[in-house]
Image (cartoon, rainbow, N blue to C red):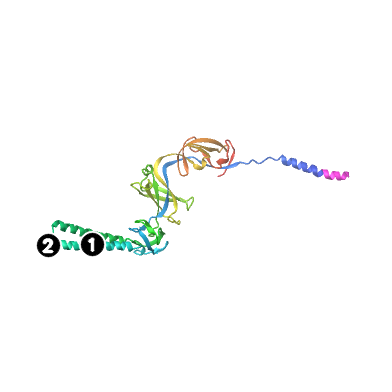
Amino acid sequence: MKKLKVFILIPVIFLACKSEKKAESPAIEQLNTVRVATLETRSISDDIVASGILSSKSELKLAFKTGGMIKRMYVNEGQQVAAGQLLAELEMVEIDAQVNQAKIGLQKAQRDYDRVKSLLDDQAATQTQFQDVTSALEAAQQQVTAAQFNQKLSKIFAPASGRILRKISDQGELITPFAPALILGTGSSAYIVELGLTDKDIVKIKNGNNATVELDAYPGEKFNATVSQIAQTVNPASGTFEVQLTLSPTNKKLISGFVAKGIIHSGSGSSGLVLPVSAVVESDGPKAVVYLYDAKTHTVSRKEVIIGKIGNDFLELKSGISQNDQVVVQGGGFLSDGEKVKLVK
């Protein structure tokens, strides 16, 4: 039995010693990793931001001059058409009747004119009567011309070769005068974005100003553009002034109807320190909190700053820190004042 006891106790003593040595090994320090950026001075412009819809610069909105029921649509969306091709027409019963009424009125006016002129030659009618029937004849001629013009514009013909981008109305629908029924693309690769600006923004821009367009279809990508047209009067429907941006050529697939955000760089403004938006961990009005990085001690310090203008990806820095200071731009949300960190380049 004594030998058994010796063999049992030896492993227990060995395990106890091993456990004691493991407890004595030092713990590895875990540091939060951060990325930093150096503050710099740059031009701070008054960028103007507004939303709009992308459309082709060559789009033509085709409409009937008169209202009525659409008798026939001869094309479908995406179809290629040739210049002069019949695209759609209204039910012509009422319109043809108006033309016939105008012609009947012209015939009566012509008979009255011939009768009074004959009486004037026989000195049985006055000059005033002759002038009246002359005026009536001219009015009847104009009514026929107008009726025939409306009759012609009760059909839509393609003004140029292109592709049907959209059918707004279809066969059997009632449509009001001048309401677009079709949108025709004539093949140009230029695209535009129309924005609605307020009066205080419209005075800051001019034709030729550089702009940037962002599309929901391409997240994170920016398309260069320029201000190509500025409205000289307010749009009564929206109460804003319409501004047109023309996109620079691109190899990306663009389709009319894409939701867009336009950023116009007005060129006005001043130079100053800028702070990356990602550096801010807290904000309250013009006050914001950032973390500064000390390269000597590898620690961060919490700092309150005052901000000014807000740009697309930066903030104007009014006071709080100086040029060449390094601010934490990634990982700041997990830090505390005086904490030692690991820098990731």
Residue ID for mark 2: 121
Relative vertical location of residue 183 with respect to residue 298 in this rendering, above or below: below
The stretch drawn in magenta includes residue 36: no
Q: Are marks 1 and 2 in contact (CB under 8 Å)?
A: no
In terms of secondary structure, where does tag 2 sit?
A: helix
What amino acid does circle 1 point to? Answer: Leu
Residue at point 77%, 41% (across, down): 17
Q: Position of residue 208 (x, y in %)?
A: 37, 48
Q: Position of residue 134 (x, y in %)?
A: 18, 59
The stretch drawn in magenta includes residue 4: yes
Relative vertical location of residue 311 with respect to residue 163 in this rendering, above or below: above
Using residue 295 as the reference point, say whether residue 66 is left or right of it: left
Q: What secondary structure prevails in the magenta region? A: helix
> Does the image show residue 322?
no
Q: Position of residue 49 (x, y in %)?
A: 43, 45
In depth, the one of 223 and 38 nearer the eye is: 223
Where is the C terminus found, in terms of image quarters?
Answer: top right
In terms of secondary structure, where does tag 1 sit?
A: helix
Q: Position of residue 144 (x, y in %)?
A: 26, 61
Residue 183 in which image quadrant: bottom left
Where is the N terminus found, in terms of image quarters?
Answer: top right
The 10 Å Cα crowd at callout 2, few under 14, some 14 to 19, many 20 or more, is few
Residue ID for mark 1: 106
What amino acid does circle 2 point to? Answer: Asp
Residues drawn in magenta: 1-9
Gap between marks 1 and 2 measured at Cα? 22 Å
Residue farthest to the left, as pictured: 123
Looking at the image, tell me whether mark 1 or mark 2 is earlier in sequence order: 1
> Does the image show residue 117?
yes
Residue farthest to the front, as pictured: 124
In depth, the one of 178 and 23 nearer the eye is: 178
